[in-house]
Image (spheres, rainbow, N blue to C red):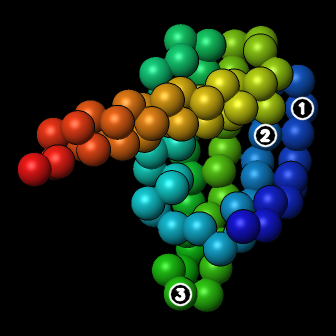
Amino acid sequence: MDLKVIEKSDTQILVEIGGESHTLLNTLKSSLLDDPRVEVATYDIKHPTISDPVLFVKTDGVDPIVAITEASERLIEVYEEFKTVFSEKASI
């Protein structure tokens, strides 16, 4: 994964996320939109095989880096819970 901040202000950020696809970006966008401080979270992939996704986040005042970090932490918690429950239920 390669990250490149294209633009950043106090309330907005545009980040290119190299080597990733809809799989990561969809879940990250959903987690961002669960945060009431996030006004807009979207991404674009110009061409699925030759371009990297670009994530855009706009907040109501919180640093967008903080919002992305917290959204990532929420995703880690969700996947850790899934891993635990799946391991328990799938054991025979």
Quarter occupied by residue 30: top left
Crowd class of label 2 (few under 14; some 14 to 19; many from 20; radius 10 Å): many
Residue 92 circle label: none
Q: At label 1, which amino acid type do we have?
A: Ser
Q: Please report contact status of discs 2 and 1: CB closer than 8 Å, yes or no.
A: yes
| Label 3, label 1: how far apart the Cα atoms are | 30 Å
In the rendered image, which residue does mark 2 sit on? 13
Residue at the spot 53% in from the left edge and 12% down from the top edge = 36
Secondary-structure class at tag 3: loop
Q: CA distance from mark 3 to mark 2?
A: 24 Å
Label 3 Cα crowd, 10 Å radius (few <14 / some 14-19 / many 20+): few
Q: Nearer the viewer, residue 46 or 19?
A: 19
Kind of residue at disc 2: Ile
Q: How far from the left and from the top, in percent, is residue 74? A: 53, 27
Residue drawn where x is 65% and y is 50% of the image = 55
Q: Residue furthest bottom?
A: 50
**Residue at the front extreme of this rendering:** 92
As drawn, the label of residue 9 is 1
Left of 14 or right of it: where is 8? right
Q: Quadrant of residue 79?
A: top left
> Which residue is at the front of the view, 62 or 60?
62
Q: Which residue is mark 3?
A: 49
